[in-house]
Image (cartoon, helix red, strand yellow):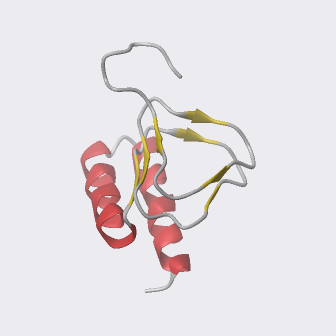
Amino acid sequence: QTLHHKDDMLHYVFLLLALFCKIVAKYMSLTVRWCTQIEIHPAAQIGKGFMIDHGCAVVIGETVVMGDYCLIYQGVTLGGTGNDTTYK
């Protein structure tokens, strides 16, 4: 599998979430996480031009609202702990 196919799969995760297929979107998200070691919650709001450089151990949580043209390096965790009710 090439990285291009993994990006396509992640695109389908967000598309399914938009179509209210949350169970399928979550399953696909877990599959992508297993293949890439990158976990992006389907409800995270990510702007255009987003890039992960050396993506091992990257976690982007449900509460993330990310702007355009962001670059993230390995080992980064974004998002709340689950205890907060506001966005970061």
State which quadrant residue 51 falls in: bottom right
- Residue farthest toward the bottom in the current orientation of the protein: 1
Q: Position of residue 32 (x, y in %)?
A: 36, 65
Q: Residue at x 34, y 61 (%)?
A: 33
Q: Position of residue 81 (x, y in %)?
A: 34, 26
Q: Is residue 57 above or below residue 80?
A: below
Q: Is residue 73 above or below residue 1?
A: above
Q: Is residue 84 above or below residue 3?
A: above
Residue 63 located left or right of residue 47: left
Residue 49 located left or right of residue 46: right
Q: Position of residue 19 (x, y in %)?
A: 42, 44
36 or 29: nearer the eye?
A: 36
Q: Quadrant of the N terminus?
A: bottom left
22 or 53: nearer the eye?
A: 53
- Residue farthest toward the top in the current orientation of the protein: 85
- Residue farthest toward the front in the current orientation of the protein: 75
**How many numbered badges does the structure rendering display?**
0
Q: Residue at x 51, y 69 (%)?
A: 8
Residue 70 located left or right of residue 60: right
Q: Residue at x 41, y 45 (%)?
A: 42
Q: Is residue 61 above or below residue 8?
A: above
Q: Position of residue 87 (x, y in %)?
A: 51, 20
77 or 14: nearer the eye?
A: 77
